[in-house]
Amino acid sequence: MNSAGGKEPDPRRDLPSVDELLRRTEVASWSEKWGREPVRARIREVLSRAREDLQSGAPAPTTERVLAEILRNLEHDRPSLQTVINGTGVVLHTNLGRAPLAREAARAAASVASSYSSLEYDLEAGTRGDRYSHCAGLIAELTGSEAALVVNNNAAAVSLTINTLARGRDVIVSRGELVEIGGGFRVPEVIERSGAYLKAVGTTNRTRIEDYRRAITPSTGLLLKVHPSNYQVSGFTEETELAELVQLGRSAGLPVMHDQGSGLLLPDLLPDTADPPVGTSVAAEADVITWSGDKLFGGPQAGLIHGRAAIVGELRANPMARAFRVDKMTLAALEWTLRAYRSPELAARSLPALRMIRESADSVRRRAEVALSALSAGAARAVEIVTLRSVLGGGSTPGFDIESAGWRMVEGADAAESFLRDFDPPVIGRIESGAFLLDFRTIGADEQDGVARAVTAWIEHEEISG
């Protein structure tokens, strides 16, 4: 009771209302980012907890404190799959999604995703169509192959091909090509899970054509050559050329498969690398060739299969093909990317992965310098521009790197890495020799302001904390 004999004022009445908070400028910006209803829901949750705290005797929170709590809840509720800024210098970073799509390819995927499409409908005939007709012809055209098929990744391409051609039979492969790819997946296990039997020949460092010849028996179903795209063997080595293996396959009546791996379609677009271009496999007349769509090709995740029409027809007829089939968004993005390759200049200009690889070190340095000028004075003093080395990544071209440039922060490297990783959008860099590095080769021109904001926020945070 107060001195006038009335009730004590209810402190809950001093809390801002939901509508009052929604009208604030900062909350309106949150609504644009996260959606009005999710923001409204977080406001109600925070206000409900505040009322409960007040009933328990807690002091009334300020509006600023309420807003801060709402923002924390919204940020905590971020989706697990987010866009990030890649400052690692690894162009095809598997953990960060490998090759980013061209904007036009992404728009093509979004267009068919948000409406009905001619995925399996023949517009000309007005009857049921074939989803693989959208890309198969383009792949055959660009590679010079008889026919083609698309599945959801290269592991699926390899598994489907082995299951179709060698189920219950032997697959002969060099011991030096029994690779392990990311995530612990190994060629021997893929062969065995595909229903075939592995027959390794030669040694780790030397495998001759005679090793394959001696291993052929009536139980042999396939000769397999795997490009070891994520490691190198040097020194006392010998490798059987694909053309030699194809000749042996022809004389023995056996199909020859080449798991080409990275999908380097136009070698002239890139610096001289250790990865063989797809055209060399076609020229060697391999019966079937497989590679990844999201590596050096620069498209969406997909497994591309092409070669002899009879073999591709068998693959399409395998019931496993349905389990490995791609969706309409992948096909739309892949078709746009394939069409871009009809013009080498368009592909080099439009595909981000190729653009990053081809950019000169001087150009990268100039962008790093421009971005540095956007930092606050205090932040700029904590950053220096340095020469770096970028790599292709994604299991491509081991031992190959490119001169690059970026930012180096020596003070608080671990804390800086953690802070920027938690920023919005997250900025991912690398720690090397005790310093935090951001390589601008993999940071787009449209992402430089975001990097400057993140680093400025980090320096200001450190100044306040210190």
Image (cartoon, rainbow, N blue to C red):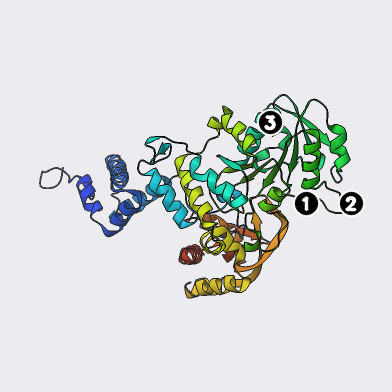
Tell me the kind of residue under disc 2. Phe
Nearer to us of marks 3 and 1 is 3
**94 versus 405 height, above or below:** above
For the residues labelled 3 and 1, the Cα–Cα distance comes to 29 Å
For the residues labelled 2 and 1, the Cα–Cα distance comes to 12 Å
Residue 415, how many percent across, how many down? 57, 58
Looking at this view, name the residue that lies furthest to the top: 168
Tell me the kind of residue under disc 3. Leu
The residue singled out by tag 1 in the image is: 232
Question: What secondary structure is found at the residue carrying circle 1?
Answer: loop
Q: What is the number of the mark on residue 236?
A: 2
In the depicted view, which residue is nearer to us: 272 or 252?
A: 252
Residues packed near mark 2 inside 10 Å, few (<14), some (14 to 19) or many (20 plus): few
Say left or right for 395 vs 53.
right
Q: Quadrant of the N terminus?
A: top left
Residues packed near mark 1 inside 10 Å, few (<14), some (14 to 19) or many (20 plus): few
Say left or right for 28 vs 203.
left
Residue 82, how many percent across, how many down? 47, 49
